[in-house]
Amino acid sequence: MATEIRARYAEALASVVPAGLTKFLFTLGGADANEHAIKIARLATGRPKIVTRYRSYHGATLGALAATGDPRRHPYEPGMPGVVRVLDPFCYRCPFGWTPDVCRRPCIDHVEEVIRYEGPESIAAVLIEVVPGTNGAFVPPSEYLPGLRAICDKYGILLIFDEVLTGFGRTGRWFALEHWNTVPDILTMGKAITSGHAPLGAVAVSAMLARWFDDHVLATGLTHAAHPISLAAGLGTLAAMTEDGLVARAAAMGLFLEKRLRDIVASREIVGDARSIGLYGVLELVKDRSTREPYVPWNGDAASQAPMKQIARAALDRGVRITTRWNYLFVAPPLCIAEADLALGLDVVEEVLANA
C-alpha cells in the first residue's frame, strides 16, 4: 500500500543511512528485518548458506534464532538449515590466544578459512552484529570490518550488518559501521528506529540488490508492514534526534563514559575489562584478573548467576537500574541523559561493586 508517510519516511531515512544503500523494506521489528535480509540474500545469490558468529543474537523468531549463535537458540534446534558459524573478534578473550599488542588478526583469516571449507559458491551472505549486544559488547579491531568487506567482495558474497541494537546514535554515530567506514550490502534496523513508540524494523539494500528485484519477485509479506503509525513514529524520531543533536551528544558523552569505566577498572579488582563505544558500554566482571575467570559461569544455571542478580538488586535499591547477563554489567543510558545523571549512575555502580 502506498502512503504519503511511507515516502516521506523513506526519504528521511535515506539521509542518515550510508550512501549506497538506496531502498528499504519496512518490517515489524529487528528480528524479521534479519529474516528478510537472509531471504533477500538467498534469493539474489541463489546460494543456501549464511555465515554468522557464535557470540551473536539476531532475534527471537525461528529464522533469526537459527542465525543466532548464543544459547537462546538451543531449545529450538534444529532450526533453519544452512547456517555456518565462525569465532568472534573478542580481544579480551581471544579464541585464538593472541593479545592485541601482537595480534595478526586471525579472526579475519578464520572467516575466510571457513568460507573456503564450506565452498564460497554455496554462501549467500555473512551476517554479523557490528558490535554485539548482550554477548559481550566487544568492539572489533580496526581491520575487522574492512577485512570482512574484502573477503565478501573476493567471493561474491553479500555482507549483512545487523544494527538493530547499535543503530540510531547509540555508538555516537548514526550507525556503528561509520566508525570503520565500511558499508554492507544489506543493513538491518529496529529498536531505536522509533524510540520504542511503535513496532518497526527496516532492511536497507544496495543499489545492486534493488536492481535485482526490479524484475524478480520478493516472495514475502507481513500483515502490518510499513504501517503508517509506525512510520510516523520513525519520522518523528529522526526529527527529534536531529533537532536535539542526540548523535553528537552520544559521541561527546561517550568520552565521559569511557573515562569513568576506565576509572572503575582501576579502582575495583572485580572488573577485568571495560569496553565502550559512544553510550554503549560493559564492565566484564571476573573472580581473578590474572586468570580472567568469569565472576559467574557463562550460561550457568539460575543459582550460579545469583551474584550478578544481587549486584543489579543493590543498584536498584539505590535508584539505578542496570542490566546484567552472565558476568557482564551493561551501561546503555538514554542518549539524552545529563552528565550529572550518568555520573550518579556510575557512582552507584562503583559503590555496589565495592561490596560484591
Image (cartoon, helix red, strand yellow):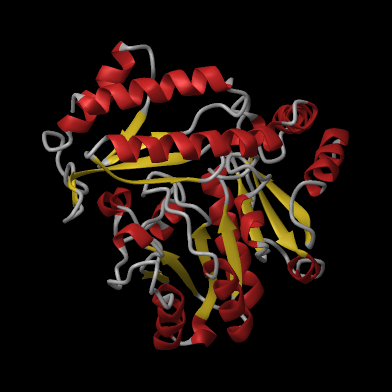
Q: Nearer the viewer, residue 188 or 5?
A: 188
Task: Find residue 77 and report its horizontal and vertical position in percent.
Answer: 29, 57
Q: In this view, does 200 lie to the left or right of 270?
A: right
Counting labels gives 0
**Residue drawn at (76%, 27%) of the image:** 236
Task: Find residue 113 and report its horizontal and vertical position in percent.
Answer: 41, 84
Q: 178 above or below 331?
A: below
**Quadrant assignment for the C terminus:** top left
Q: Which residue lies furthest to the left in this view?
A: 303
Q: 114 above or below 65?
A: below
**Quadrant assignment for the N terminus:** top right
Q: In this view, does 137 lie to the left or right of 11?
A: left
**Residue drawn at (40%, 62%) of the image:** 80
Res. 312 image quadrant: top left
Q: Which of 91 and 187 is in front in this view?
A: 91
Q: Nearer the viewer, residue 291 or 109?
A: 291
Task: Find residue 167 and report its horizontal and vertical position in percent.
Answer: 61, 44
Res. 149 image quadrant: bottom right
* Residue 46 appears in the picture as rendered: no
Q: Is residue 129 left or right of residue 201?
A: left
**Residue drawn at (52%, 69%) of the image:** 144
* Residue 289 appears in the picture as rendered: yes
**Residue drawn at (32%, 71%) of the image:** 98
Q: Is residue 112 left or right of residue 215?
A: left
Task: Find residue 110 and report its horizontal and vertical position in percent.
Answer: 40, 78
